[in-house]
Amino acid sequence: MSTGQSNTEPNADVVGMWVTADGYIRQELRADGRYDEARGDRRSAYTGRYTVTGNHLDYVDDAGFTATGDIRDGVLYHEHLVLYRESADDEH
């Protein structure tokens, strides 16, 4: 599955865990072009695939709905959400 590789515009490095400031929403962007989003205690609340073009992400949920996101200054703006990359030091 392609993650939107482009020969003219390098893609943002998005693979990893992205988390809202309160930790309620955790979105894992995997290297295989799949995502898994947890909300609170609900694991895999949303799953699907994503592609990256430059700093822009396009999501297609397994249920069929679509969403978009953009990386700006190392922050993922996904629809109405603001997510921050979780580092290994942040995990408990």
Image (cartoon, rainbow, N blue to C red):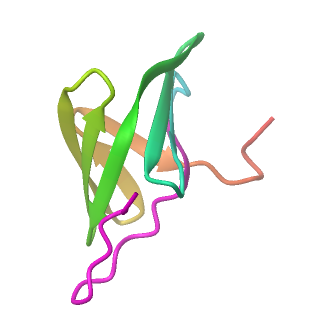
Q: Nearer the viewer, residue 19 or 13?
A: 13
Q: Is residue 44 left or right of residue 63?
A: right
Q: Is residue 23 magenta?
A: no
Task: Report the residue at 26% width, 88% height from top.
Answer: 7
| Residue 89 spot, x, y in % from top left | 77, 51
Query: Which is the main secondary structure of the residues drawn in magenta?
Result: loop
Q: Nearer the viewer, residue 41 or 80?
A: 41
Tell me if I can see residue 15 in this picture.
Answer: yes
* Image vertical order of residue 64 relative to residue 85, above or below: above
Quadrant placement of the C terminus: top right
* Image vertical order of residue 47 relative to residue 72, above or below: above
Quadrant placement of the N terminus: bottom left
Residue furthest top as drawn: 41
Task: Report the residue at 36% width, 66% height from top.
Answer: 73
Q: Is residue 51 left or right of residue 86?
A: left
Q: Is residue 7 left or right of residue 89?
A: left
Task: Report the residue at 45% width, 60% height from top.
Answer: 14
Q: Is residue 5 magenta?
A: yes
Task: Report the residue at 54% width, 14% height from top.
Answer: 40
Q: Nearer the viewer, residue 92 or 54?
A: 54
Residue furthest front as drawn: 1
Give the magenta-colored segment's residue range. 1-20
In which quadrant of the rendered view does residue 61 lie?
A: top left
| Residue 21 spot, x, y in % from top left | 49, 34
Tell me if I can see residue 20 in this picture.
Answer: no
| Residue 10 spot, x, y in % from top left | 32, 82
